[in-house]
Image: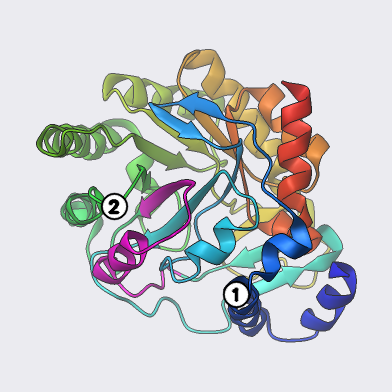
Amino acid sequence: MYPIARSLLFRLDPETTHGMALNALDALHKVGGIKRVYGEPVSDPVELMGLRFPNRVGLAAGLDKNADHLDALGELGFGFVEVGTVTPKAQPGNPKPRLFRLAGHEAIINRFGFNNKGVEHLVAQVKKRHYNGIVGINIGKNLTTSVEHALDDYLACLNAVHGAADYIAVNISSPNTPGLRTLQFGEQLDALLGPIRAQSRKLDAQAGRNVPLLVKIAPDMSEEEVALVAGSIARNELDGVIATNTTVSREAVSDDPQAQEAGGLSGKPVFEASNTVIRLLRSHLPTLPIIGVGGIDSGEAAKTKIAAGADLVQLYSGLIYQGPALVRQCANALKQGN
């Protein structure tokens, strides 16, 4: 059924379709229709970072920026759902149009620019959830906050989300907030991660529970740059890393008429690039938990991501092109591969 629905939805503006699909999913959830259509979630529990994940397949940040659809998305069978990216203050993001489908490549370009309703709204939504899987919260900085003062925004978000999150992901790799990716390297990365790590430990002690702290990185890095990032992650004793965010490269989609739209490219063309970064990270950080994301469109692709060195995987663009059945397909493939 999904290919028919997709052919109809793909005739509409991508961002309009995005909202319609999420609202339809909410409506189906309210009448108990999701489990009737897709069945029970795959049970394949794994212990990682002190958390028990019901299965290894998660939803990547960006699909549900405000946690407005958390329960419905969770019921699709995800072992974990990452919401956000959220910023301290609400912001509209970049002007529309800002979402583009490259259907011939099963890819998406977005330049949303962290559009969200602000951290207070997201936290309230997460706290009232019924979904019993793991919930990660992805945090970022406001557009109007300079890179020099980015730490202030990350700390504000950290303080706000700590009580509601099962884990927290620091997003320093979106290409749609000017200057953000410069925080990924060298002294700037240490200057950011050090204080965030120190504050997270303080909050953990106050709360009497440990909330894992992860960082999300870009695929557009050389081997030397990945090594530098890995060194900073190790020095600051982060609990994990998410690899990777979208790419600014257009090499794999250069023949598409929309290839030169500004923004981050996700989907199938990012698959190998993210796998390369995962392999490099694993060589430098042999025991650190890695969440692999980028171009997963089948159970076999999910297994390849694990084989590259990831412990868990996340879906986004593949879900758009393949439909909700992809969640259980990937979870079953990983369960059978254990």
Q: Residue at x 63, y 56 (%)?
A: 316
x and y, in percent, of residue 60 in the image: 55, 51
Q: Residue at x 58, y 61 (%)?
A: 73
Q: Is residue 104 above or below residue 117?
A: above
User: What's the residue type where badge 2 is placed?
Assistant: Ala
User: For mark 2, does the 10 Å Cα neighbourhood hold few (<14), some (14 to 19), or many (20 or more) residues?
Assistant: some
Magenta segment:
113-138
| Labels in figure, total | 2
Viewer-proximal residue among 244 and 202: 202
Residue 269 seen: no
Which residue matches tag 2? 164
Residue 288 seen: yes
134 horizontally vs 275: left or right = left
User: What's the residue type where badge 1 is placed?
Assistant: Leu
> Spatial distance from mark 2 to mark 1, Cα to Cα?
22 Å
Q: Residue at x 32, y 48 (%)?
A: 165
Which residue matches tag 1? 22
- Name the element at disc 1: helix
113 horizontally vs 314: left or right = left
x and y, in percent, of residue 49 in the image: 40, 27
x and y, in percent, of residue 157 in the image: 23, 56
Q: Residue at x 78, y 26 (%)?
A: 336
> In what quadrant of the picture does the C terminus appear?
top right
> In what quadrant of the picture does the N terminus appear?
bottom right
